[in-house]
Image (cartoon, rainbow, N blue to C red):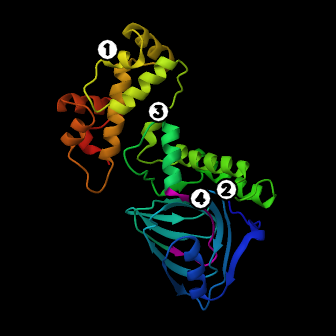
Amino acid sequence: MTTHQPLLQAHTVLRTTELDEARAAVAEKYCDHRLTLASGLKADVVHNHVRGADLSLNVLQYGADVAINPGELQDFYLLQLPLAGHAEVHHRGEAVDASPRFGTLLNPDRPTTMRWRDGCRKLMVQVDAAFLGRVACEEIGGEIPGPVRFDPKVALTRPGGRRLRALSLAAVRAVDAGDVTPSAQDLTMLALERTLVATMLETQPSNVSHLFGHRRAVSARHLRRAVAFIRESFHETLSLDDIAAASGVHPRTLQAGFRAQLGVTPIQYLRDIRLDMARFHLLRRHNRASVSDIAYDCGYSHLGRFSRDFRARFGHAPRDTR
């Protein structure tokens, strides 16, 4: 899986043997960070970079064994796909031995430390956090109750990882071939950016992966109104009559439409939305509310019923969610 061919060679923004110059230049494209030579006499830094509307494509190598500490990325996600060599990446409490077999996906609000070994070269996709959040809402078909947080380890030998790597490489090669122009005005580039981020959300495990089960499209207008009403009001006490009134049809008509197009009843759909939102909040690692508070906030009034439904949907008790 090692990739040796030149990528973004016509878009070199930095070539230097001076580590301070490299740190300052890379910080302009990413964020401020500490960069130190871990071993060896000198670096040979090459950074190729193109920027679109909401993401950038990068190929970066340091040509030496270096330690990098960017802390928190703040306002962007960073997909790192090693093309050659190895790196040790520590992020969100997990250590990843990054290589052409395993990439990493860094979250904006969790600290990172890395050590790139001599010979390490990476293709990196930098995605604006606000853009990824918008795409997530569009793909799910509703609002998400907080930031998306990905598992940091990307298995590049598995179908999802292979697909994400192939699409990232295809984007770079399209730029190299002149098929797309890296700008906010190129419609092909804009479509490519959205496809790449949607694929990232679909293939890489995260705290919103379970929400993608509700993406089946509904064609009937009254069903779209019902789904929108449930998503907006799931935390309230709702009955079938409430949902039918919001959709503008008789409850029996609504029941038949849900079964035909979504395979569940309106009340089952409401229950699944509540459970998925509860699981989202339970996956938080910091400042997480109690199980009972989350259950009540998501529309449950009976904790025993919440625990039973949660276990039936996810296979474990709410308190065991990690």
Q: Relative to 129, say whether 239 is above or below.
A: above
Judge depth for marks 2 and 3 and give the one in front: 2
In the image, 6 versus 119, the foreground residue is 6
- Mark 3 → mark 1, Cα distance in angstroms: 25 Å
Disc 3 element: helix
Left or right side of 165 for 136 = left
Residue 188 versus residue 269: which sits nearer the camera?
188
Mark 1 packing: few (<14 Cα in 10 Å), some, or many (20+)?
some
The secondary structure that most of the magenta stretch takes on is strand
* Label 1, label 4: how far apart the Cα atoms are: 53 Å
Mark 4 and mark 2: Cα distance apart in space: 32 Å
Residue that mark 2 sits on = 184
Circle 2 packing at 10 Å, graded few (<14), some (14-19), many (20+), is: some
Residue 7, picture quadrant:
bottom right
Q: In which quarter of the image is residue 255?
A: top left
Answer with mark 4 or mark 3, whichever residue precedes in sequence: 4
Q: Mark 1 points at which residue?
A: 241
Query: 80 above or below 269?
Result: below
Q: Name the residue under label 4.
A: 101
**Secondary structure under the numbered disc 2 in the rendered image:** loop
Which residue is pictured at 29% across the width and 57% down the height?
Answer: 286
Crowd class of label 4 (few under 14; some 14 to 19; many from 20; radius 10 Å): many
What is the distance, in whole Å, between disc 1 and disc 2 at their CAs? 47 Å
Q: Is mark 1 on a helix, strand or loop?
A: helix
Q: What residue type is labelled 4?
A: Arg
Establish if 12 lies above or below 16. Answer: above
Q: What stretch is highlighted in magenta?
A: 115-129
- Check disc 3 and report the residue beneath it: 213
User: Residue 231 versus residue 210: which sits nearer the camera?
Assistant: 231
